[in-house]
């Protein structure tokens, strides 16, 4: 189940306080998405609005969880205990990641219309955040997926 809250204080360029806590099901495994306004997807031939895309400014992981608020940060490390639990759940699966790269598409530069970059969208007090919560701790596959998305973003920034 996804719930939404707000950033209520920015402590530094990597750390914020969010108005969701234990009372709302937040745990130290919770990963938040800082949401920007949706961007419309428009058909260039008909100008029809086909839908909206969620734009994520950044992701945060809970560092300290209190009853009514959470201190969250943009930087975290997955513990070896989490990896061991994943091995218990998924047996002998190999957790080495395999990168698949189909290369760049052959497109004209004037056809590229990128989404707003994270750097173009400053994080502000009052920004909406979204997090998955359940009665149990977030599954480790969700944590792994969120970490994979962060690593993908870092790779894009380097290129």
Image: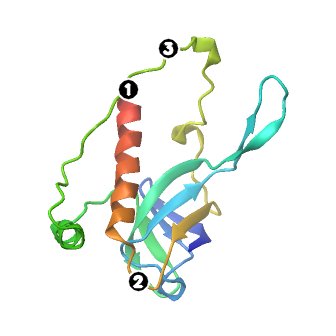
Number of numbered tags placed on the structure image: 3
Q: Earlier in the sequence, mark 3 or mark 2?
A: 3
Q: Quadrant of residue 128?
A: bottom right
- Residue at 84%, 29% (x, y): give it: 47
Q: Which mark is residue 59?
A: none
**Position of residue 146 measured from the top left corner of the image (x, y, whole percent):** 40, 57
Element under disc 2: loop
Crowding near the residue tagged with mark 1, few <14, some 14–19, many ≥20 C-alpha atoms within 10 Å: few
Discs 2, 1 touching: Cβ within 8 Å: no
Where 65 sits versus 84, above or below? Answer: below
CA gap, disc 3 and disc 2: 45 Å
Query: Residue 142: x, y in percent?
Result: 39, 64
Crowd rating for badge 3 (residues with CA inside 10 Å; few <14, some 14–19, many 20+): few
Q: Which residue is mark 2?
A: 136
Q: Of callouts 2 and 1, which one flags the residue occurring earlier in the amino acid sequence?
A: 1
Please indicate whether residue 27 sits to the left or right of residue 47 in the image.
left
Residue with the mark numbered 1:
102
The Cα atoms of the two marked residues, 1 and 3, are separated by: 11 Å
Q: Residue 92 or 4: which is nearer the viewer?
A: 92
Find numbered disc 3 in the image and state the secondary structure of the residue it sits on.
Answer: loop
Say whether marks 3 and 2 touch (CB < 8 Å). no
Find residue 102 and report its image quarter.
top left
Q: Pointers 1 and 3 in contact (CB under 8 A)? A: no
Of the 4 image quadrants, the one containing the N terminus is bottom right
Q: Position of residue 42 (x, y in %)?
A: 76, 33
According to the image, label 3 marks what residue? Answer: 106
Compared to residue 127, the image places residue 39 above or below, namely: above
Q: Eyeballing the image, is 21 above or below 13?
A: below
């Amino acid at each position: 189940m996804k719930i939404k809250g707000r950033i209520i204080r920015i402590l530094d360029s990597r750390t914020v306080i969010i108005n969701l806590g234990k009372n709302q099901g937040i745990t130290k495994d919770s990963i938040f998405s800082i949401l920007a306004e949706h961007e419309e997807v428009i058909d260039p031939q008909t100008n029809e609005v086909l839908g909206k895309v969620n734009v994520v400014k950044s992701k945060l992981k809970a560092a300290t969880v209190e009853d009514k608020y959470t201190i969250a940060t943009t930087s975290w490390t997955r513990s070896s205990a989490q990896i061991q639990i994943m091995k218990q759940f998924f047996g002998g699966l190999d957790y080495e990641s395999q990168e698949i790269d189909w290369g760049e598409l052959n497109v004209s530069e004037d056809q590229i219309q990128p989404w707003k970059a994270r750097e173009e969208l400053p994080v502000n007090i009052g920004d909406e955040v979204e997090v998955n919560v359940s009665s149990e701790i977030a599954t480790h596959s969700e944590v792994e997926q969120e970490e994979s998305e962060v690593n993908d973003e870092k790779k894009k920034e380097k290129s």
